[in-house]
Image: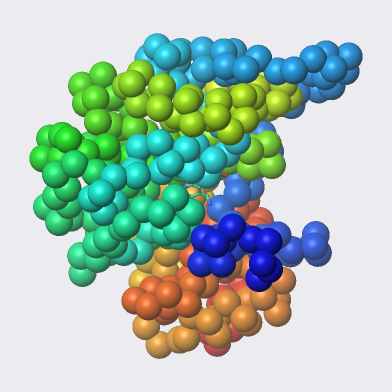
Amino acid sequence: MSKFWSPFVKDLVPYIPGEQPKLSKLVKLNTNENPYGPSPRAVAAMQAELGETLRLYPDPSGDRLKRAVADYYGVRPEQVFVGNGSDEVLAHAFHGLFQHREPLLFPDISYSFYPVYCGLYDIDFRAIPLNDDFQIDVADYAQPNGGIIFPNPNAPTGCLLGLGAIERLLESNSDSVVLIDEAYIDFGGESAIALVDRYANLLVTQTLSKSRSLAGLRVGLAVGHPDLIEALERIKNSFNSYPLDRIAIAGAAAAFEDREHFERTRRQVIDSRETVTAAMEALGFEVLPSSANFIFARHPQRDASEIAAKLREQGVIVRHFKTARIDQFLRITIGTPEQNQVLLDSLRQLLG
Ligand code: PMP
């Protein structure tokens, strides 16, 4: 702390990103990255940008990417916002849409960046417990005019809420913005983007970090009513007038255009998730039903932090949260079949 800080900085509790270990030989199953590489078409599009044109500023509206997203989802480009990772898109939404007098509602056990943004933008919040099965019960969410946010599938549980329940939530909270954070939707759920033309209070965010394997590029997006998108554009243009650099715009647009690579790799991850789930259950783990590229599992007789530490000794890193109610769970990213095999062999060995 220093006398030079703005007063509110001393109370900020920043987000701590998952570990990016410096050793390369580890089986890294801790931060939900895609085990397969990005689309070769995306890589070629980025390489084509690496030259003379970098002396020019990028397109301040990122139109090429907005068009690619709009085409993919059958919406209009003015319904699309793009930014530097969905974390930044979420930050602009908190800033531009959630600073109300009413508290923001989100599940107790969800993405731990939400309370951080509430701290940053001075937003009151109420965290609503998940039900006994770790599911979101939409009947628990009633907000007359404020905001509601949750990941779907939820993180770190991986549990999915269906579109029917989402519609009930939108209808019963029609004067609040409902933000659905679909970071993991491509691994098993139906996107609520299908509903944006019917609900002016719905904003959906997505990322290219997971199903499109571009975590290192930092690209995220939001889709919603043009009025909600305009709020995000105003915030962005008051902060940084370029959403993304030229390389990111080109690579992200090409990633959306390469449907074949996307479909094939996400299918591989989904199939592996089912294999890993069955094998973990055979080892005695309880695994929550996952629609994401990770599973959330606990062993009834063994301590989760101990399992995580022992896996690490064997070169496998998974995520353990010390948070109440989930401190006996491990969140394990689905890897390649070879990585999953190393995980399962290590578990078999350490469970004896
Ligand atoms: N939402 C959720 C639920 C996440 O788990 C993550 C990844 N940590 C993000 C958003 C942010 O993803 P990114 O900034 O890489 O787009």
Q: Is residue 137 left or right of residue 253?
A: left
Residue 72 locus on image (x, y percent): 45, 18
Q: Which residue is drawn at 51% across and 12% down?
A: 67
Q: Where 76 sits versus 283, above or below?
A: above
Question: How many numbered discs?
Answer: 0
Describe residue 97's horizontal placement relative to residue 49 as left or right.
left
Give x and y (percent) for residue 212.
Answer: 58, 34
Name the residue furthest front.
3
Residue 29 in view: no
Query: Which x, y percent locates residue 40?
Result: 71, 26
Q: Quick check: can you spot residue 315?
A: yes
Foreground of the two, 113 or 319 = 113
Residue 290, image x and y in percent? 37, 54
Q: Which of 310 and 50 is in front in this view?
A: 50
Q: Quadrant of residue 201?
A: top left
Vertically, is 258 above or below 296? above
Q: Which residue sits at x=68%, y=68%? A: 2
Q: In which quarter of the image is the N terminus?
A: bottom right
Vertical placement of residue 14 versus 349, above or below: above
Q: Indicate the quadrant where residue 170 lies.
A: top left
65 over 102 or under it: above or below? above
**Quadrant placement of the C terminus:** bottom right
State how the image is colored. rainbow
* Side of 6 relative to 96 (left or right): right
Q: Please state which of residues 55 and 154 is positioned toward the viewer in this rendering.
A: 55
Residue at 28% across / 32% down in the picture? 202
Residue at 47% across / 38% down in the picture?
92
- Between residue 135 and residue 188, name the one nearer to us: 135
